[in-house]
């Protein structure tokens, strides 16, 4: 049984039986049957479907955004923005997919030799709850544009979001006369996922989630020799050096840390500040965090909603408590509030050291961890002393920041700006943050056959 709980009240709002084996087989069979016809459609025709999806998403923002607010607690203003961003992703691949998939001519001893990018079949997307519409678009838009069929296994806590996404995509496909099954929703329990990955009708897997979950998915897919892209957790460093614009840095870092109540893989999680500006930066951050409103995510004035689940809040509070017990200064928050729902106050921990829990583990919530570095060289070393490598940011002069970017062990680095995902740019991690890339030209080429074509006669 899939159970949806409103995290702002703690009450169950929906229960739905998980897909049984017959339904799973039906979804996979439909995707396999639909693939040849979808593969053979012109890129321009696939693009029109993606544009229709984007238009429908934009037209239904006020209908779709509240689903996220109820099912995982995203503040309504952020939820509206997420639906719009999902629409942008579909539009981007409609506009640029043909360019990204164009043949690449490569000189050789052939009369003509080139690489063409061909679809590979059905791609399974295993998605988390924290950005239900955006992550579905990030998975589906490039895969569909490349000519693959998609099966989406969304998180069981966002059942309504998954159904709504599916309805939007299927409407566009049906209007274009595409065969049934090009996009399918598979609401299964976690225990059933292994069987889906192993099914011969699934050709590749895109997974977003924890490092532990990613390792399990990679192990199963690897044993079946199936391609995977893994976007996993992060303990993202944000370096603030002595020559930074502290005002701009404080404003942006605060936003980065509390978007989606801090429940974001690429949020700034370890704020590493060079000693000469440490005290000033701590106060700038504290004053901004103190102004944020934690409350009902349905209210327009709410900045920070609830944590998505009770167990996640418990884990977050354990991390805060252990870090304070180890000697960190608690400047804000740190106490579980009474009352319904899974709310957690905006919390700030200063003087955190590398051996403390909140610096060693990924914190998924509105908890800011600030660490002191004696100089820029040690700040960089601290940033890299982690098992994760998803994203990072650095605040300094632009020239110096660009030079440092190549020394930071992360899949993406933002210099004097917020770390974000953007349909135009590739995103992904290294180390235990995963492998492969999503978005941009790199993302659409993850699930294609880069086929070499050699045309004779051989040239001298």
Image: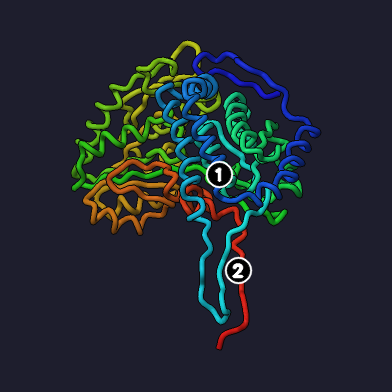
Q: In the displayed structure, would residue 310 be above or below residue 338?
A: below
Residue 455 x/y as whole percent: 61, 75
Q: Is residue 435 visible?
A: no
Query: Which is more N-terminal, label 1 or label 2?
Result: 1
The quarter of the rendered structure image containing the C terminus is bottom right
Residue at 60% across, 24% down: 160
- Helix or strand or loop: what does disc 1 sit on? helix
Q: Nearer the viewer, residue 132 or 435?
A: 132
In the picture of the structure, the residue carrying the numbered disc 1 is 211
Q: In the displayed structure, would residue 108 be above or below residue 447?
A: below
Residue 453 x/y as whole percent: 61, 70
Residue at 42% across, 52% down: 410
| Quadrant in the picture for residue 185 | top right
Q: How many marks?
A: 2
Q: Nearer the viewer, residue 121 or 412?
A: 121
Q: Nearer the viewer, residue 268 or 224?
A: 224
Q: Nearer the viewer, residue 280 or 210?
A: 210
In the picture of the structure, the residue carrying the numbered disc 2 is 452
Residue at 55% across, 26% down: 311
Please tell me whether mark 2 or mark 1 is closer to you in this view. 2
Residue 376 x/y as whole percent: 26, 52
Residue 423 x/y as whole percent: 44, 44
For mark 2, does the 10 Å Cα neighbourhood hold few (<14), some (14 to 19), or many (20 or more) residues? some
Taking the view exactly as shown, the residue that stands out farthest to the bottom is 460
Taking the view exactly as shown, the residue that stands out farthest to the top is 339
**How does the figure colour the protein chain or chains?**
rainbow
For mark 1, does the 10 Å Cα neighbourhood hold few (<14), some (14 to 19), or many (20 or more) residues? some
The quarter of the rendered structure image containing the N terminus is top right
Residue at 43% across, 26% down: 80
């Amino acid at each position: 049984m899939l159970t949806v709980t409103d995290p702002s009240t703690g009450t169950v709002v929906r229960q739905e039986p998980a897909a049984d084996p017959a339904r799973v087989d039906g979804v996979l069979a439909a995707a396999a049957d639909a693939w040849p016809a979808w593969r053979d459609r012109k890129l321009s025709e696939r693009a029109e479907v993606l544009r229709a999806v984007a238009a429908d998403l934009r037209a239904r923002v006020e209908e779709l955004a509240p689903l996220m607010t109820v099912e995982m607690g995203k503040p309504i203003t952020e939820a509206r923005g997420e639906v719009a961003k999902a629409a942008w992703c579909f539009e981007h691949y409609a506009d640029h997919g043909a360019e990204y998939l164009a043949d690449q001519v490569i000189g050789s001893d052939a009369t003509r030799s080139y690489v063409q990018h061909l679809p590979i079949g059905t791609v399974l997307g295993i998605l988390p709850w924290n950005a239900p519409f955006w992550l579905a678009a990030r998975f589906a838009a490039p895969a569909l544009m490349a000519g693959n069929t998609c099966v989406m296994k969304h998180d069981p806590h966002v059942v309504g979001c998954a159904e709504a996404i599916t309805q939007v995509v299927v409407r566009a496909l049906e209007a274009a006369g595409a065969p049934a099954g090009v996009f399918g929703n598979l609401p299964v329990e976690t225990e059933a996922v292994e069987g889906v990955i192993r099914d011969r009708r699934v050709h590749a897997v895109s997974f977003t989630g924890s490092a532990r979950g990613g390792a399990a998915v990679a192990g199963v897919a690897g044993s079946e020799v199936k391609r995977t892209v893994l976007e996993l957790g992060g303990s993202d460093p944000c370096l603030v050096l002595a020559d930074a614009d502290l005002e701009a840095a404080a404003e942006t870092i605060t936003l980065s840390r509390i978007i989606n109540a801090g429940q974001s893989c690429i949020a700034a999680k370890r704020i590493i500040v060079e000693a000469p500006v440490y005290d000033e930066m701590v106060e700038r951050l504290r004053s901004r965090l103190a102004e944020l409103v934690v409350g009902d995510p349905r209210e327009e004035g709410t900045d920070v909603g609830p944590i998505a689940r009770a167990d996640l809040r418990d884990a977050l509070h354990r991390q805060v408590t252990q870090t304070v017990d180890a000697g960190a200064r608690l400047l804000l928050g740190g106490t579980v509030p009474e009352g319904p729902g899974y709310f957690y106050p905006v919390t700030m921990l200063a003087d955190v050291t590398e051996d403390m829990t909140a610096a060693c583990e990924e914190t998924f919530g509105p908890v800011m961890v600030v660490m002191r570095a004696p100089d820029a060289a040690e700040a960089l070393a601290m940033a890299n002393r982690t098992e994760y490598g998803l994203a990072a940011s650095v605040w300094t002069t632009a020239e110096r920041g660009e030079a440092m970017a190549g020394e930071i062990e992360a899949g993406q680095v933002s210099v004097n700006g917020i770390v974000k995902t953007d349909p135009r740019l590739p995103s992904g991690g290294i180390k235990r943050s995963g492998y492969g890339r999503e978005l941009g030209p790199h993302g659409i080429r993850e699930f294609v056959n880069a086929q070499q074509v050699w045309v004779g006669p051989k040239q001298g």
